[in-house]
Image (cartoon, grey):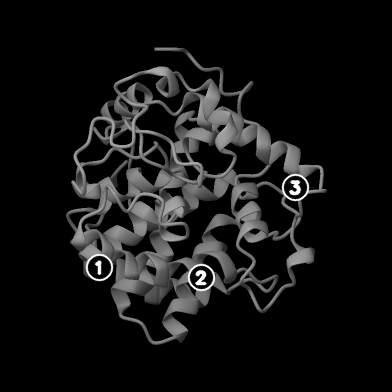
Amino acid sequence: MTAFNNAEISPLTSLDQWEDDLLVRYPETETKAKEDYRNYDDPARDTVREFYRLNHTYQTYDFVREKEREFLAFDKKELPVWGAMEFLNTLVDDSDPDTDLDQLQHLLQTAEAIRADGHPDWFVLTGFLHDMGKVLCLFGEPQWAVVGDTFPVGCQHSDKIVYPEYFANNPDSNDGRYNTKYGIYEPNCGLRNVHMSWGHDEYLYQLMKDYMPEPALYMMRYHSFYAQHREEAYNHLMDDHDHEMFKWVRAFNPYDLYSKSPKPPVVSELKPYYQELIAKYLPATLRL
């Protein structure tokens, strides 16, 4: 397996540049005009393109399987959930032009928007937890292996995935086992049998799968799977249960994308509520 130098292949200057790019591609917010977010003429677009060039080149089936073995042992660190959030906050980058909020504040804004709309408390907690998998960056992972739109590996790459031209450099594109419509999978086999590109979504799902309700787990696992929940490019792999659960994924998406606000939440005021919510669903500490 290729050894990667993270310093050389982490092109994003901010962990959230991918999320800012989503706002360009899916500008459904009423609080900020499309032109106010990064656009395709902004120099940062070159950075995002480089991110996806790397992501699409190196996210192979073998790479994903290697990362599953490496990180799903959960033997890197043990922390309480709130401690993991504070750990995540060391990723803050002041170069992000669309928000100067840290990761914890972004998660609180997402969760508070969900709570304000009267959703169940597990849905609120999902909003609070949904990006916790980005702690992978703190274990030396390059950003292209942590964030970014996700997609199935082990089968043909859809042209509905952002920047599909970069898959030309992916070895799986020339491998007869993986470059057909179904690849190693059966028609409508269900996403539970499909390996997704590696990143914070799959990591968090595996971390939470014994604790959270199934709709929450679908939100965590597939909130970055834009080729499906926006483009429906992989209906041929999904079963009826996936289609039903993706109603929750689509319900979650606007809260993730459009809850950003320059006004930060008051963490000290919200912390008791979220600590109580965490205690209701999760163990005192998590093995990362």
Residue at x 41%, y 72% (from the top left corner): 251
Q: Which residue lies under the disc numbered 2?
A: 254
Secondary structure state at the residue bearing disc 3: loop
- Tag shown at residue 95: 3
Secondary structure state at the residue bearing disc 1: helix
Few, some or many C-alpha atoms within 10 Å of disc 2 (few <14, some 14-19, many ≥20)? some
Residue 222 found in image quarter:
bottom left
Residue 275 shows in this picture: no
Residue at x 21%, y 44% (from the top left corner): 187
Few, some or many C-alpha atoms within 10 Å of disc 3 (few <14, some 14-19, many ≥20)? few
- Identity, as a three-letter code, of the amino acid under mark 2: Pro
Query: Label 1 vs label 2: CA separation?
Result: 18 Å
Which mark sits nearer the N-terminus, 1 or 3? 3
- Identity, as a three-letter code, of the amino acid under mark 1: Glu
Q: Which residue lies under the disc numbered 1?
A: 244
Residue at x 74%, y 61% (from the top left corner): 37
Disc nearest the viewer among 2 and 3 = 2
